[in-house]
Image (cartoon, rainbow, N blue to C red):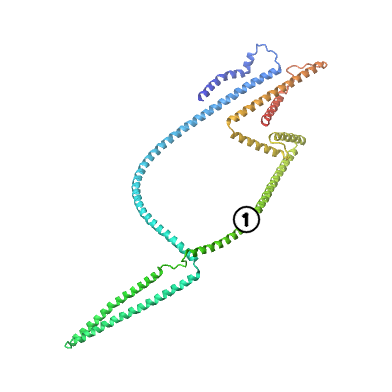
């Protein structure tokens, strides 16, 4: 691209002096001084001038394009240099990042190895503990399931047991407990009496020992013996008291065990035969059937009510939707009317300025409305709703957007083929129109020539106009205007047919 730009610069430098000489009026006079200047027609002169203008214009455009290309090439070179600089910086940063990453990865590997080792040890210990725990949990869950099942059966049977039988068994249980408590109290009284008898027997035995001994002993020895007897009695009392305490504890433990045995006795069941349960099941089944029939009737009534409620709800929803649509239609109508009012106000302001006549503006608006309606009829269909010009234009724009979206979705090959077909059709139509206009122009020329031939010759009066004193013609403006109209017609035919 840069070489092409340099080559174009060289060609431009070579061609610029020639162009400068040709643009010089002195050089033009020197070249054309000795030539035989033939008389040229005005049309030829104008055509040559047009060709010269077109050549100059094309040269100027090419120079501008070459200048733009040079600027673009310089900008691209600057961008490339900047990108190279950024790439070098990124490469250096990336190298630093790789070094740091390698260092961190080595440290991370060491830490990971130590952590994995400790983790494996912990995992092995956890697995071992989990295995033990799972075994205990499985046993507990088995026992819990069995207990739940038994409790469920017990609750089921208790629910089916009559309340009278339960009250009777409760009274019997209370009576048994009362009798056991009385027996326990009697046992405690007997044990306390036995303790007292053992203490009195010990005291009498000590007295007999003192009497059997001789009176020859001194009073001091008698006193000493008496004190020893008293000490022995007290020791025996102390020995007997823990014995009694142990007896009471044993009695209490026996009572507790007795009560526990009472609570752990096999529970009495009201049902002794499975036929009793079957009879109760039959009664419950009959009761359930009656309840089911009642529930079905209530469900039917509920379904009818639900159906009525749904119908009412749908009706209300439809009415609300209709009212909402009416509200939106009214809002859009109000908005359109406000837009119309603003448009009319703008038109009134434009007409009040005096720049344009009201009749011309109305005529232009009618023509515009007619053209828009023709385009609407060709693209959408008949204007049955009698919508305004702005609404028709909005509809046409929406249709164009839909077509553009569908074209974007379509395959490119199909779109290209359709474009080629349309372009071919347009060229053929333009060729036919051009031939028709040429034919009409030729017929008009022939008609005018016949009229001139049939008309009487006109005698020119006065001085004949010289070629250079002829007033300027305005064909160029008309031709430009005609070219613009032709281009506009061509665009209309291309886009709206």
Q: How many marks?
A: 1
Q: How far across and down, in percent of the image, does residue 486 sit?
A: 69, 27
Which image quadrant is residue 289 in?
A: bottom right
With respect to residue 179, does 150 lie above or below? above
With respect to residue 268, does 461 lie above or below? above
Asked whether 398 or 296 is in front, the reply is 296
Q: How far across and down, in percent of the image, does residue 105 sit?
A: 37, 41
- Asked whether, in this view, residue 459 is left or right of residue 190, the answer is right
With respect to residue 347, does 309 lie above or below? below
Asked whether 339 or 75 is in front, the reply is 339
Q: How far across and down, in percent of the image, does residue 114 sit?
A: 33, 46
Which residue lies at the image location 48% right of the left edge and 71% below the top edge? 167
The local crowd at label 1, few if under 14, some if 14 to 19, many if 20 or more residues have their Cα within 10 Å, is: few
Which residue lies at the image location 47% right of the left edge and 31% below the top edge? 81
Tag 1 secondary structure: helix
Q: Residue furthest bottom?
A: 215
Pointer 1 residue = 303
Which image quadrant is residue 406 in?
A: top right
Q: Which quadrant of the rendered structure holds the C terminus?
A: top right
Q: How far across and down, in percent of the image, does residue 353 sit?
A: 74, 38
Q: Residue furthest left?
A: 216
Which image quadrant is residue 56 in?
A: top right
- Asked whether, in this view, residue 235 is left or right of residue 51, the answer is left
- Asked whether, in this view, residue 108 is left or right of residue 75, the answer is left
Which residue lies at the image location 61% right of the left edge and 33% below the top edge? 407
Asked whether 183 or 20 is in front, the reply is 183
With respect to residue 53, does 280 lie above or below? below
């Amino acid at each position: 691209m840069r070489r092409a730009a340099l080559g174009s610069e060289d060609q431009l430098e070579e061609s610029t002096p020639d162009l400068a000489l040709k643009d010089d009026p002195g050089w033009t006079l020197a070249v054309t001084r000795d030539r035989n200047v033939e008389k040229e027609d005005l049309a030829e002169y104008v055509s040559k001038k047009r060709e010269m203008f077109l050549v100059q214009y094309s040269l100027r455009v090419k120079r501008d394009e070459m200048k733009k290309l040079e600027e673009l090439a310089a900008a691209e070179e600057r961008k490339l240099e900047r990108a190279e600089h950024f790439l070098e910086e990124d490469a250096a940063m990336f190298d630093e990042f790789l070094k740091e990453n390698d260092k961190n990865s080595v440290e991370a590997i060491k830490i990971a190895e130590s952590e994995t080792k400790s983790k494996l040890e912990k995992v092995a210990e956890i697995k071992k503990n989990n295995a033990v725990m799972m075994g205990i949990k499985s046993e507990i869950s088995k026992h819990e399931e069995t207990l739940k099942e038994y409790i469920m059966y017990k609750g089921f049977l208790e629910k089916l047991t009559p309340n009278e039988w339960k009250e009777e068994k409760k009274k019997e249980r209370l009576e048994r407990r009362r009798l056991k408590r009385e027996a326990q109290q009697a046992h405690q009284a007997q044990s306390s009496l036995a303790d007292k008898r053992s203490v009195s027997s010990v005291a009498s035995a000590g007295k007999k020992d003192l009497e059997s001994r001789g009176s020859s002993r001194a009073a001091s020895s008698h006193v000493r013996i008496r004190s020893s007897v008293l000490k022995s009695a007290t020791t025996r009392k102390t020995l007997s008291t823990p014995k009694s305490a142990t007896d009471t504890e044993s009695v209490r433990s026996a009572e507790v065990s007795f009560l526990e045995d009472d609570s752990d006795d096999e529970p009495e069941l009201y049902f002794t035969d499975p036929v009793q349960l079957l009879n109760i099941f039959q009664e419950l089944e009959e009761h359930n059937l009656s309840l089911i029939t009642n529930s079905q009737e209530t469900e039917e009534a509920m379904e009818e009510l639900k159906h009525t409620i749904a119908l009412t709800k749908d009706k209300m929803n439809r009415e609300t939707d209709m009212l909402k649509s009416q509200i939106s239609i009214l809002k859009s109508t109000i908005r359109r009317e406000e837009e119309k009012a603003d448009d009319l106000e703008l038109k009134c302001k434009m007409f009040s300025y005096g720049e344009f006549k009201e009749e011309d503006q109305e005529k232009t608006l009618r023509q515009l409305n007619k053209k828009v309606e023709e385009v609407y009829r060709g693209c959408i269909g008949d204007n049955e709703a009698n919508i305004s010009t702005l609404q028709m234009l909005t509809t046409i724009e929406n249709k164009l957007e839909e077509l553009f979206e569908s074209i974007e979705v379509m395959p490119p090959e199909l779109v290209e083929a359709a474009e080629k077909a349309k372009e071919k059709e347009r060229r053929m139509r333009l060729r036919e129109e051009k031939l028709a206009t040429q034919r009409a122009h030729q017929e008009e020329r022939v008609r005018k020539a016949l009229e001139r031939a049939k008309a009487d010759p006109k005698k020119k009066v006065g001085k004949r106009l010289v070629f250079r004193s002829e007033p300027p013609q305005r064909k160029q403006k008309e031709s430009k205007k005609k070219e613009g109209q032709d281009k506009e017609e061509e665009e209309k035919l291309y886009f709206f047919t």
